[in-house]
Structure formats: structure tokens, C-alpha cells
Amino acid sequence: MPRAAVGLKGGHKGRARQYTSPEEIDAQLQAEKQKAREEEEQEEGGEGATGDPKKEKKSLDSDESDEDDEDYQQKRKGVEGLIDIENPNRVIQTTKKVTQLDLDGPKELSRREREEIEKQKAKERYMKMHLAGKTEQAKADLARLAIIRKQREEAARKKEEERKAKDEAAMAGKRLQSLSLNK
């Protein structure tokens, strides 16, 4: 017979859960902090028990004190207190005030920005050299232009010679006509 039919609803996973209220958690934390303070006072040799007003005030203001939280977190278990480990990859965030910022100093550029600026400068240098005729491409272009100019000059000279020859032939033809008319 299936388990659900027997009367077991969900087995061990369906038991009622107990939740701790925030007030109980705060009370437990306060008790741990108080216990830690008492241990520190005992380690110091009972100096805190002689009636030091600052330490009594700290115990009264335990809710607002940030130093107590830091002391509690810094207390380490086992060998952690003896070995100081520093992670070289961990970047510690440091906050700077507005007065500490150096706005007039040189701005550090990212790698991409530096590469883009270098590319633009290289292109400008190439264009200057190209216009001056010092690059391979410019030399090839100038040689091609010289060849084209020579070809055009030769074509213009031939055309001019053909025109002169045609004019002379026309003039010779007119002379023959005029001579034949005169006779």
C-alpha cells in the first residue's frame, strides 16, 4: 500500500519548521559580544573591572558601537590568529575625498584609447609622407602619372601634326583649284 494512504503525509520532510525571530538573533549576538568583552577584560588582568568609565560606557552603548563589531569580526579561530595571510589578487577599495582628487593631472588612458590615438597619429604621418612622395605607393603613383603625361603629350603632338597635315592638304587643294580657274 502506498505511504500516503497509510496516513504519513510527506514523511520526515514535512515536519513543522521552527524559525528564529530577529529579536532572538539580536539577543544571541549581544550575549556573544558581552561574553567576548568579559574574556578580553579577564585577559587584560582585570583592569576593566576596576571601574574604567570608558569601558563601562562601551558596554552600555553596545548597540551603536561599530568598534565592537570590528573587534568581534577580527577575532580569529585556531591558527588563523598566528598566520597572517594576504591575498595579492585582492584589491582593497579605497575611497577618496573630493579634495584629494587630482583633476589637473594627466588622465590615464585605457589600452584601447591609447591604441586608437596611436593609429590616428600613424595615419597622419603616412599621409604627410605620401603627400611628400616618400612612400612606396606615392612613388608608384608618381611614376604612373609621368607615363600617362608622356602618353598624352605624344597623343596631343600627333593630333596637332595630323591637323597641320590636313590643313596643308586643304590649302594645296585650294591652290590647285585656283590655278585651274586661272587658266
Image (tube, rainbow, N blue to C red):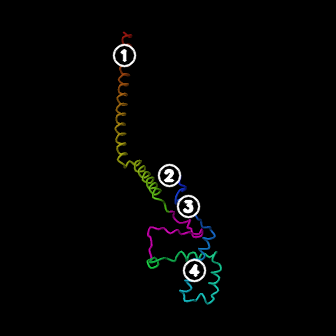
Helix, strand or loop status at disc 1:
helix
Q: Is residue 40 a member of the stretch shown in magenta? A: no
Q: Which residue is mark 2?
A: 2
Query: In which quadrant is the C terminus drawn?
Result: top left
Q: Nearer the viewer, mark 4 or mark 1?
A: 4
| Mark 4 residue type | Lys
Location of residue 108 in the rendering, given as x and y in whole percent from the top left corner: 49, 62
**Between residues 18 and 100, which one lies in front from this camera angle?**
18
Q: For the residues marked 1 and 3, what is the alpha-carbon distance in whole angstroms? A: 130 Å
In the picture, the disc for residue 18 is none
Helix, strand or loop status at disc 3:
loop
* Upstream in sequence: badge 3 or badge 4: 3
Magenta residues?
84-107
Q: Nearer the viewer, mark 3 or mark 4?
A: 3
Q: Which secondary structure type mostly characterizes the magenta part of the structure?
A: loop
Instruction: Tell me, yes or no, whether the two marked residues, 2 and 4, touch with CB atoms within 8 Å.
Output: no
Q: Which residue is mark 1?
A: 173
Instruction: Tell me, yes or no, whether the two marked residues, 3 and 2, touch with CB atoms within 8 Å.
Output: no
Q: Nearer the viewer, mark 2 or mark 4?
A: 2
* Upstream in sequence: badge 2 or badge 1: 2
**Between residues 85 and 39, which one lies in front from this camera angle?**
39
| Mark 3 residue type | Arg
Q: Which residue is mark 3?
A: 15
* Upstream in sequence: badge 4 or badge 1: 4
Left or right of 105? Residue 133 is left
Task: Please give the name of the residue rendered at 65% of the width and 78% of the height, measured from the top-left corner.
Answer: 61
Helix, strand or loop status at disc 4:
helix
| Mark 1 residue type | Gly
Task: Please give the name of the residue rendered at 40% of the width and 48% of the height, measured from the top-left corner.
Answer: 130
Q: For the residues marked 3 and 4, what is the alpha-carbon distance in whole angstroms? A: 34 Å
Left or right of 87? Residue 176 is left
